[in-house]
Amino acid sequence: MAATALKCRECKREYGLEARYVCELCFGPLEVAYAAPDASDVAELRRKIQGGPQNIWRYSEWLPLEGGRPGSTRASTAGLPAGCTPLIKADRLAERLGLGEVWVKNDAANPTHSFKDRVVSVATARAQELGFTTLACASTGNLANAVAAQAAALGMPSYVFIPANLEEQKILATGVYGTNVVAINGNYDDVNRLCVELSGEREGWAFVNVNMRPYYAEGSKTIAYEIAEQLGWETPDRVVGPIASGSQFTKLDKAFAEWLELGLITGDHPTFNGAQAVGCNPVAHAWEQGRDVCQPVKPDTIAKSLAIGNPADGPYALDVARRTGGSIEQVTDDEIRAGIRLLAETTGVFTETAGGVTTAVLAKLAEQGAIDHEERVVLVITGDGLKTLDAVRDSFTVHTIEPTFDAFEAEFSAMSEAI
Amino acid sequence: MAVKVKLPTQLRAAAGGDGEVSVEGSTVGDALDALYAVHPDLKERIADEDGTLRRFVNVYLDGDDIRFGEGLATPVKDGAQLQILPAVAGG
């Protein structure tokens, strides 16, 4: 399926496959359009995917590169390949929540420990095709990690722009790659505003989530393709995923729709539940109010990777939730911390605050009785707990004892008596 | 009040190539109307027929999204800067 054009989601005007992200006429977002692929032999199409590389480029038919895959080898090992992350059957989590079937898509298992490696791989490969030599981004942290690492792997200079108050782990895990870390005195929306302005002035720079955004966003589809492939070419009944800008949420929906239309997968289109923090809830608030546009907010939450107060794809995320019979929920910082613990204690997956938001929303939906026992639910975990350690600090007891048998016995026999 | 309006690259062709336009106005809406008077082609790009801003246009007054103020009715001070930017970026 070859990319054919960039198309405005609002007025449908088409543009060439350039470094362009908004419609000249109406300022609507541009999205990659593809020629319908030959789906006469679905089994052959599946075999082709299965015979592809163990990374996102196995889905290159649905990604917007002119050259198909980056690199000259069949393995597509150019840069820092992302994807093919585990889908874990989370029986203990399901049991705890009184649900029938829950799966965890663990996208922390990417090279820089978040789903952002997927979108950056696609944006960078396309940027190179278009002749860009410098990478840049506006980031809440995970994207900074991914851009800095990808640039290092490919030997490209890079600039990452972040809010100055970001978690220390995310700053350290970015600077180590030798990038230019630019910390802005302001929140993510201030960072984004500056990057939009800069992208207009720095012609040789590929801002992965600004002038490369149509290509970048397509990378998120690969999460859904993997889920469907890992479930044996079937759709899940429900997807619970985080919402920051709303881009990933809408692309997961698009990916399932593309494959269902082709007949590549079976099942119904999944119900989509979006997850936000109360401290940054522009999309959840609009949902609650029954509106189809978002009023911006000033973020104040521990879920910094979701702290986008002015979400670009907010209206489309609302549309996905509405169209699929889902919802957009919000949870407090305490619920987020509890969500991190719940996932860790029942699955062995330690997620960052964004995953705490998503897990807490799943727990909330389960408690409300919104999920049938027969449903197959996929929880999308997008980042690693090691990036937001403050969220779990002092949340458990460390038993410090002298290195003697008696000290151990004294500590733990006292404990077992207490139990 | 004298207001400086900064235009994004996507709008400069409709403003004769200018990236900055100086106008007069006491509110954001007034200043934008004055901008449309100088460069009529800008109006349909930024606003709907009734003058409300298009869904994917963000306007910042001295760095703050005007939706945190009173929208188009937000008063502007002398020497203020209005910045118009596409909304669809980031994330």
Image (cartoon, coloured by chain):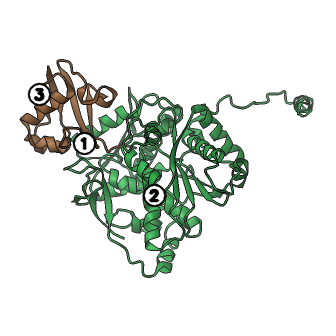
Chain colours: A green, B brown
Q: Is residue B78 above or below residue A194?
A: above
Return the residue found at the far bottom: A41
* Image x and y of residue B85, in percent: 25, 38
Do marks 2 and 1 both belong to one polypeptide chain?
Answer: no
Return the residue found at the far top: B78
Query: Going by the image, does A64 lie left or right of A377?
Result: left
The nearer-to-camera label among 2 and 1 is 1
Q: Which mark is residue B22?
A: 3
The nearer-to-camera label among 1 and 3 is 1
Q: Which mark is residue A253?
A: 2
SS under mark 2: helix
Do the CB atoms of the residues marked 1 and 3 lie less than 8 Å apart? Answer: no
Looking at the rendered structure, the kind of residue marked 1 is: Arg
Q: The numbered mark 1 sits on a residue in which chain?
A: B
Residue drawn at point x = 63 percent, y = 40 percent: A340
Q: Which residue is mark 1?
A: B54
Looking at the rendered structure, the kind of residue marked 2 is: Asp
Residue drawn at point x = 59 percent, y = 37 percent: A336
